Image (cartoon, rainbow, N blue to C red):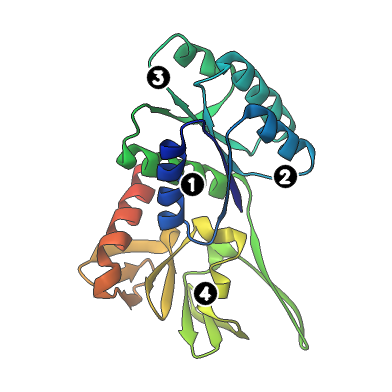
């Protein structure tokens, strides 16, 4: 999944990129300093699921472009960055997911990103497809409760237990576009946020009663991202 940033202030562009890389390390980020560069990129085939768009320059033009872009691609999530002026009211001519004000509040940036990812997860059911010598096997990501790394193999678990074992590293599994669903809570486990019933200190309880460990180094990040997920439910 690609995320684009139109921002004229290099410091703000850097802050946004840092938040995205920290929370979505497997996503690609592209930064433009001019609206014309953004338009040319998309005109040339660039595909972006989430766009952070500054309204510092030519706000009406950017808002109108966003509206037309969403007419063509309704699943694109727009997050505006603006100051409190008249353009704030004009943004609703498009369909923004979130509006960030200057100077940036990093907590708000994280919430905007989580909200956009959550909306994308609801927009279309995605399947994980396995192709090997035995044939083709497809499972909806929503049916996967968690995955377990076993050396270079990956065990996929659903509500009833083990579904499939495949040759894939957990880091490669997390690179797939499903990224909005899964959180790596331990070096050997990635859990589907949709199926968490309880989050306790250093342990996750799933809807089917299964328990997964949370490594000490990942606990705060796991807790924070799960809380953001619940806020956007």
- Say left or right for 58 vs 56: right
Give the label, 2 or 1, closer to the camera: 2
* Rendering coords of residue 190 (x, y %): 44, 71
Q: Which residue is mark 3?
A: 83
Q: CA distance from mark 3 to mark 2?
A: 28 Å
- Say left or right for 126 vs 188: right
What is the crowding at mark 3: few (fewer than 14 residues within 10 Å), some, or many (at least 20)? some
- Say left or right for 38 vs 57: right
Which quadrant: the C terminus?
top left
Depth check: give the residue in front, 210 or 228: 228
Q: CA distance from mark 3 to mark 4?
A: 39 Å
| Mark nearer the N terminus (1 vs 3) | 3
Q: CA distance from mark 2 to mark 4?
A: 25 Å
Q: Which residue is mark 4?
A: 171
* Rendering coords of residue 49 (x, y %): 61, 44
Give the answer, above or below, for where 216 lies relative to 44. Answer: below
Q: Which residue is mark 2?
A: 46
Give the label, 1 or 3, closer to the camera: 3
Q: CA distance from mark 2 to mark 1?
A: 22 Å
| Extreme residue toward the front, this view | 10
Give the label, 2 or 4, closer to the camera: 2
Give the answer, above or below, for where 53 lies relative to 153. Answer: above
What is the crowding at mark 2: few (fewer than 14 residues within 10 Å), some, or many (at least 20)? few
Helix, strand, or loop for circle 2?
loop
- Say left or right for 70 vs 132: left
Residue at the (54%, 83%) spot, across then down: 154
Q: Label for residue 118? A: 1
Q: Label for residue 3? A: none
């Amino acid at each position: 999944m690609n995320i684009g940033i139109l921002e004229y202030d290099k410091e703000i562009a850097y802050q946004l990129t840092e938040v995205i890389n920290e929370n979505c390390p497997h996503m690609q980020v592209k930064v433009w300093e001019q609206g014309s560069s953004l338009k040319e990129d998309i005109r040339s085939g660039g595909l972006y699921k989430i766009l952070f768009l500054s309204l510092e320059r030519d706000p009406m033009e950017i808002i109108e472009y966003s509206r037309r872009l969403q007419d063509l691609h309704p699943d694109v999530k727009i997050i505006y960055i603006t100051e409190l002026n008249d353009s704030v009211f004009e943004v609703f001519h498009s369909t923004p997911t979130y509006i960030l004000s200057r100077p940036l509040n990093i907590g708000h940036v994280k919430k905007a990103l989580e909200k956009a990812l959550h909306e994308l997860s609801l927009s279309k059911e995605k399947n994980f497809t396995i192709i090997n010598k035995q044939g083709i096997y497809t499972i909806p990501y929503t049916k996967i409760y968690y995955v377990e790394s076993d050396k270079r193999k990956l065990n996929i678990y659903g509500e009833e237990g083990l579904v499939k074992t495949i040759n894939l590293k957990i880091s490669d599994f997390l690179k797939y576009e499903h990224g909005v669903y899964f959180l790596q809570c331990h070096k050997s486990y990635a859990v589907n946020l949709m199926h968490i019933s309880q989050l306790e200190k250093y342990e996750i309880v799933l809807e089917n009663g299964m328990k997964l460990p949370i490594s000490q180094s990942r606990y705060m990040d796991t807790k924070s991202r799960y809380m953001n997920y619940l806020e956007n439910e």
